[in-house]
Each structure stands twice: as structure tokens, then as C-alpha cells.
Image (cartoon, coloured by chain):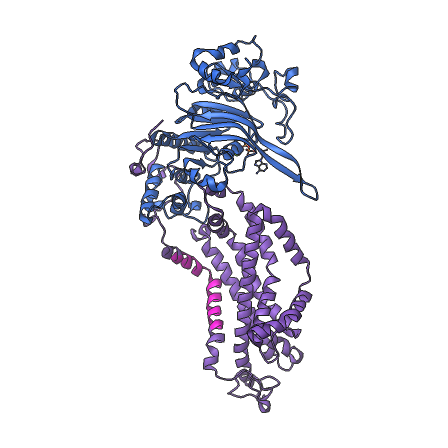
Amino acid sequence: MTDRTDPHERAEPPPSPAVPAGGAPDGGEIAEAAGSAAPGQSSTSLWRDVWVQFREHKGAVIGLAFLIFITLFVIAGPWIWQVDPADLDIRNKDVRPIYTWLWDREADVMWSRPLGTDNLGRDILANLMQGGRVSMAVGWVAMLLALILGTLIGVLAGYFRALDGLLMRFTDLMLALPLLPLLLVMMLLFRDQLRAAFGPEQGIFVLIVTAIGITSWMHTARIVRGDILALKEREYVLAARSIGTPSRRMITRHLLPNVLSPIMVSATLGLATAIITESALSFLGLGFPSDYPTWGKILFDSVERMERFPERVIWPGLCISLTVLAVNYIGDGLRDALDPRIRGR
Amino acid sequence: MLDAAAPAPATPAADGAPPLLDVRGLKMHFPIHSGLLRRQVGAVKAVDGVDFTIRPGETLGLVGESGCGKSTCGRAILRLYDITEGSIRIDGVEIGHLSQHALRKHRPTMQMVFQDPQASLNPRMNVSQIIREPLDEHTKLSSAEKDEKVLELMDAVGLNRAFARRFPHAFSGGQRQRIGIARALALNPKFIVCDEPIAALDVSIQAQVVNLLEDLQEQFGLTYLFISHDLSMVRHIATRVAVMYLGRIVELAPREALYAEPLHPYTQALLSAVPEPDPALARKVERVILKGDVPSPANPPKGCNFCTRCPKVMDICHEIDPMPRHLPGGRQVACHLYEDTKTTTDPTAAHKPGHSSAQQGVSP
Ligand SMILES: Nc1ncnc2c1ncn2[C@@H]1O[C@H](COP(=O)(O)OP(=O)(O)O)[C@@H](O)[C@H]1O
Ligand SMILES: [Mg+2]
């Protein structure tokens, strides 16, 4: 039997002329040499590359800036604008936003109420801030919950053949259920227990987030499963199997990074759906209590008097759609930035 | 004469060394499910009873038409699939029916180089991460030692060290194949399955990759199963050649013997299709053109698998499946033409001194 070569003796490049040093003859497409020869790409420089590519995407950068702004607006805003959103000021009800004065000198405007008040005299700016906190929290948490559930079920169904049939029938079942009635039933069944356990607001928050989360993971699961099924047959997965990579790392190292794009798309859509579903639930009187503002609820409450007071629809509407749009663009930019094929260009 | 059909070692171990790889009765059937209840209605018999051995340091070429089960055979040997039947002994360890978990510690012995260098590299990992994966899984080296090892491997396969941080999409096909080879070498394997490693490459690059494989074989004492449909490339690299047809090995012989005097009608047809550069010879060689298509591996014909297309088909071929027979010179052929004593290759010749002990070991 031939002697096994000691691994450390491999340092010498093979002397044979048949092995071109540096693979030059078939390396025409690589013109410039990489700057550094350090092999293990440290994670810091990887993330710097990702950031550089992310900045290439103008929409993503604007989206990120807006998302940071709106997040600061809802989180830090109430410290600066210290008006109680629930404070009823009946004498100053139906005040128009300050800018109305520009074209309508007769309008009822006040400097202390820059975006006006609603029909009960509550400050709209303060309500937008408070409502934004709730809407963003519901949107993000419900979206993440749906994403984690969907990815988990999709990966399990796609990777483990034994689970596929069962999990996909379950997904189909959930898809076939009419969502709104299901949500209504859940609300009616669990509202009181959760209120008792977490307090009125937190209880409703937990309920809404779980309800939205567990009724919107199915599309993610189906997309992820389909992609995993296709990826599983790729030769690099076979190569990993021939190395002996266990299933857990096979999934995290080879499969999940390659289903990132559909997951990212699901995430951006999921955020929008979650914010809007929450509004719909609040509108039906099943969401948060009436004195607890959210963007969706402010919007729905003002629809009847939209013609006289358009600002009460426009501002929460703008908040919702711009947030969703921003997240959408960020997802787009992130997807590109995380793909080495695009980053390399 | 009877014992010739018994499962004897495919090649008498003339040099006395035990085979590195010993495959017996390997079957890989993929179930076909159909109908509302997804019941199994049949099986694709991609590999249907294959025996061979590979001695340390040699290269066994595995040739055959596309779809005849070469890749499946290679992957089944490495247990990338759960095999239907048979035994696989590698380096003295029976791995045919080990669980994937128990297999893990035997994985470093055997590695694979894939056909499509693009698809065999994860697009989201850079070269260094790709070559490191086997080291991460099987060694306890420190990060710096792994980095050093990666660079050594890149040198060994002729990749510029400066490319370690690049991603696979930035490389040409030949370079990607080198990355795949470096990954396969990382754990000091003894045995590598090369599944058409050059089929997806430009002709000008094919020779470079084959030369690299040969150099590495010499340098590290590797043993190859070299799968290809390119008979001239196999002639260049292999020491012995197995010809596969519809999930079976129809002929297995040392390279010179096989190319000089192919015995099985299928081998004859394959070889006659290889262009002969010498016009004088080319006129002499009559070309055997096979008619019809390869039957479906889900529904192979009764009797000999090749009987539907064989130019020398006999009545018995439609009835009885020919068993592989051992002929002198380490040859093996599965064909009824070589079963009767009247043919030139007298089966009694199989009892010549060289390997009589091996034969006696089997016969009662
Ligand atoms: N995973 C699989 N499931 C079902 N059939 C398969 C699978 N892999 C291969 N086959 C079938 O097995 C046969 C042999 O395929 P393969 O080994 O890839 O042939 P080759 O490599 O010789 O071209 C083909 O008929 C193919 O359709
Ligand atoms: Mg193949």
C-alpha cells in the first residue's frame, strides 16, 4: 500500500508542469488578484462588504433612513412631545393641523396641537406616536413569529421526507381555513384568560401577535419547502453529506443561506400584512380597547369623517405604507448585499 | 466451471494486497410512488447487482452510456444513498448498512469529486470556507492551523492563495473543479470517486484537470473510481476498466486487454464508436451501430439486460440472465457467448496457477 503523505508535507506546490501555478491558464476571468491572502474571511470584513454593497442600493438606504426615523419617532418621540395621547380636551376638539392655516386662514388651528385633535380633543401627534409603538411592535413580532414558524415548518418538511406529508397537509389545512372567522374565534376564546394573565393591554398584545403569527406562516412554509426540496438534490449538499456534515449544520450552513431571498420577501410582505390585519381586528372591535390607539385604529376611526378631516386618515396611512415600503426596500437591498454573486460585481 | 459463477473476487489479488474497496451485489433501487395514496408501484433499478474490487493505488474506470447508473453507483458506494442491498467494504470496514451517524467517522477515508463544478460548491461560501468544511467537521485543529492547511491544499491543486476569499462564481469551470478537488483532499482520503470530473469542462481544461488528478494520485497514494463516458480519457487514466449497462457491470478488464480485445458485444459497440485517428485502421474496424434506445431501468428486459440491442443476440439471452464469469488475465464478462466451452477462452483456463488458491477457497 502506498504511504500516506503527512499533511504537513503538502506545503510544497506540486512540481509538475501540468499543474499551473495559480491556475493561470483557465483563470482568464480573474484579472486582478485579491488584495490580501488571508484565507479565513473574518466576519468583520464580510459584514463590511455586505454594508458596502447595501449602500449601493439607493432605495434600501433611503428605506433604512426612514425606518430609523420612524422608529425614533415612535420610541423617543413621546419624551420630547410630552402630551398624553389619551387626554380628552373637549373644548379643543376637531382642531385642524397647523399647516391648514397656509390656505385656510379661517381654520381652527393651534400651535400647541401641530397635527390637530380628533373629535374628542385628543392630540393626533401624540396618538400617532403611541399608536406607532403598538403597530410596529405588533407588526415586527407577528412577522417574526410567522417567519420563524414558516421557515421551521418549511425546512422540516423539505428536509425530512418522513415529516413532509404530515406537515404539508397541516399547512394546506391552515390555508383552507377562513382567516377572519378563525381569528374571531380565537379572540373570543382566549381574550379573557390572557387579559387575566398579562393585564388588559399586554394580554391583548400577546393574543393579537400570536393570532396573526400562527395564521400567516403558511405561504412562507410552502415557499421554503419547495426551495429546500430543490436545494437538497444539489451537488454541494451531496458533497456535505460525503463529508459527514450532520443534518443540523447541513440546514444552517447549506440550506438556510440559500433560501434567504424568499424568506426575505415573505418577511417584508409579512410586516405589512401584520400591521393591516391588526387594524382590521381593531376595526371589528376585537383588537385593542378603544382608548388604546394604533395606526390602523386611528385610520379606521377617522374614515367616516374623512372628507372634512383628511389628515386623520392621511397621517396614519402614510405611516403604515411608508414603513412597509421602507422595510420592503431594505429587504431588497439586504438580499442583494447578502448574495455573493451580486456583491462580487 | 460452476464455481466461476460464484461470487469470487473480481480480480485475483495477484500482489497479495487486500482490496481497498470491495463491492458485492450492490443494488440501489429508487422507489416509484404513484396514485392517490402514493403507493409504491415499482422501482428504478439504477444499480442492480454490481460486484467489483479496487486495489490500493489503482484507478478503476467506470464507463457506460448516460443514465446507466454510473453516478448512482459512485454515490451509493460512498453511502450518499441508503442502499437497497449488497455489501461495501472499504479499507476493511463494512459500511453497506451503517447508519449515517455511525458512518461519520469513516467519511474521511472516502471522498467525491462531482461532475458539475458549479453545482458542487455552495455559492454562499468562499473558497476558504468550502475547503475548511471537512476540517471543521473532522479535525480539532486551531483556526490558524486550518487556515494554513487550506492554503497548502490550494497550493496542492494549483489555486492561487490570493483567491482564498473569493466566492465560487468568480472562478472558471476548471478552477471550480480544483476547489472541489481540494475539498475532497482535505481529510487525507484513501479513496476518491471522481464522477465525470471533466465532463462539464472545456476540452482544453480537461487535460489539465486529469493531469492534476494523476499527480495527486502519485503524491498522496490515492485510489480512484473514475466515472466517465469518455472512453479515450478513461484509457488514459484507468488501470482497469468496468463497462456498465443498465445497472450492471457487463465487462471488467485491465485497460490494455479491454481496448485490444473487447469481449462483450456492448463493449465492442462502445469501442467501435470511438473515432480512430489512423485512417488505415479506421477502415479496417467495422463500426457496430446499436439500434434502439436503452430500456428503462424501471422495467429492464427479461434475461440479459442487453438482449434488446445486442447484435449477437441468441435465444438464451432472452431467457437467462448471464452471470459474470471470470476469464484469464483478471477479466470478467457477463455474456452467454462466453459460457460454452467451445469459445476460445476456455473456462478451465481460469484454474491456472496464478489464482487457483482464490478459486479453491470458494469451491467446496
Ligand atoms: N434520486 C433518484 N430518484 C429516482 N431515480 C433516480 C435518482 N437518481 C438517479 N435516478 C435514475 O437512475 C438512473 C441512473 O442515473 P445515473 O446514475 O445518474 O446515470 P449516469 O450517471 O450513468 O448518467 C437514471 O435512470 C435516473 O433517472
Ligand atoms: Mg452521471
Number of residue marks: 0
**Residue A298 counted in the magenta span:** no
User: Where residue A280 sits in the image (x, y, percent)?
Assistant: 64, 71
- In this rendering, the answer to whether B61 lies above or below A150 is above
- A15 horizontally vs B297: left or right: left
Query: In the depicted view, which residue is nearer to us: B327 or A189?
Result: A189
User: Where residue B100 sits in the image (x, y, percent)?
Assistant: 49, 41
- In this rendering, the answer to whether B355 lies above or below B24 is above
Chain letter for the part of the structure drawn in purple:
A
User: Where residue B134 sits in the image (x, y, percent)?
Assistant: 40, 43
Where, by quadrant of the figure, is residue B250 drawn?
A: top right
- Residue depicted at 62% across the width and 68% down the height: A277
The magenta stretch spans which residues? A47-71
- A166 horizontally vs B277: left or right: right
User: Where residue A30 sits in the image (x, y, percent)?
Assistant: 38, 44
Chain letter for the part of the structure drawn in blue:
B
Where, by quadrant of the figure, is residue A187 drawn?
A: bottom right
- Residue depicted at 29% across the width and 38% down the height: A8
